[in-house]
């Protein structure tokens, strides 16, 4: 079970907490960490505590809980990638970098290896899309990915969607595809 808390108990944070709790009660979800923090206007991140930003734009959706659920699942899959063996990652990176080209999404992580970060996000985005295809209905799934202009990885997600089966086969070779237990 996942516990959702607020950082400062601000109205936006409480709203995000309630929307996310609604989604977590409705959909099955992967669990790699059992605590989520809603924090005003922060960029979602997975470590050290999975944190979801409380932003005004979330209310623009008919089902904000679905958008927050996608963010939650995406950040959970960062924990999945952290659980994988470093040798497996190195072999997988070599393979997928040779087979696919970067899609132009830019990440500004300053001190981090941007190339490695891109391919980690590639795997996380793939697993998020794969998982959501199974648990959301078609309308909800389309709502999430039709909002691409507001998403951090629009080119990567579009590429993954277009080449889904091929990427699925390649990532399975390295154990980089999540399977619900």
Image (spheres, rainbow, N blue to C red):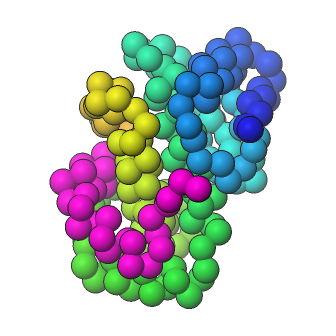
Q: Is residue 53 visible?
A: yes
Q: Position of residue 94 (x, y in %)?
A: 38, 85
Query: Viewed as shown, does residue 2 lie left or right of 72?
Result: right
Q: Residue at x 24, y 51 (%)?
A: 161
Instruction: Choose between 109 and 137: the one closer to the eye.
Output: 137
In the picture, which quadrant includes the C terminus? bottom right
Q: Residue at x 34, y 83 (%)?
A: 95
Q: Residue at x 52, y 73 (%)?
A: 113
Q: Which residues are magenta?
A: 154-181
Q: Position of residue 174 (x, y in %)?
A: 44, 78
- On whether residue 179 falls in the magenta region, the answer is yes
Query: Viewed as shown, does residue 25 lie left or right of 71?
Result: right
Q: Residue at x 74, y 30 (%)?
A: 4
Quadrant assignment, res 28: top right
Q: Position of residue 9 (x, y in %)?
A: 80, 19
In the picture, which quadrant includes the N terminus? top right
Work out whether 145 lies above or below 88: above
Quadrant assignment, res 52: top right
Q: Name, please, the residue furthest toward the front.
A: 181
Q: Position of residue 119 (x, y in %)?
A: 42, 68
Instruction: Choose between 45 and 135: the one closer to the eye.
Output: 135
Work out whether 112 lies above or below 12: below
């Amino acid at each position: 079970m996942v516990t959702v808390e607020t950082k400062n108990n601000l109205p936006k944070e409480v709203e995000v907490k309630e929307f996310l709790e609604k989604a977590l009660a409705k959909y099955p979800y992967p669990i790699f960490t059992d605590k989520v923090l809603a924090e005003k206007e922060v960029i979602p991140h997975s470590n050290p505590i999975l944190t979801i930003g409380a932003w005004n734009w979330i209310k623009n959706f008919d089902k904000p809980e679905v958008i927050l659920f996608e963010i939650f699942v995406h950040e959970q899959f960062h924990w999945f990638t952290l659980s994988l063996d470093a040798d497996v990652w190195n072999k997988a990176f070599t393979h997928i970098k040779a087979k696919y080209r970067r899609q132009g999404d830019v990440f500004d992580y300053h001190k981090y290896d941007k190339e490695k970060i891109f391919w980690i996000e590639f795997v996380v985005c793939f697993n998020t899309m794969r998982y959501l295809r199974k648990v959301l209905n078609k309308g909800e799934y389309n709502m999430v990915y039709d909002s691409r202009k507001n998403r951090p990885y629009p080119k990567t997600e579009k590429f993954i969607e277009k080449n889904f089966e091929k990427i699925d086969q390649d990532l399975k070779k390295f154990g980089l595809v999540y399977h619900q237990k």
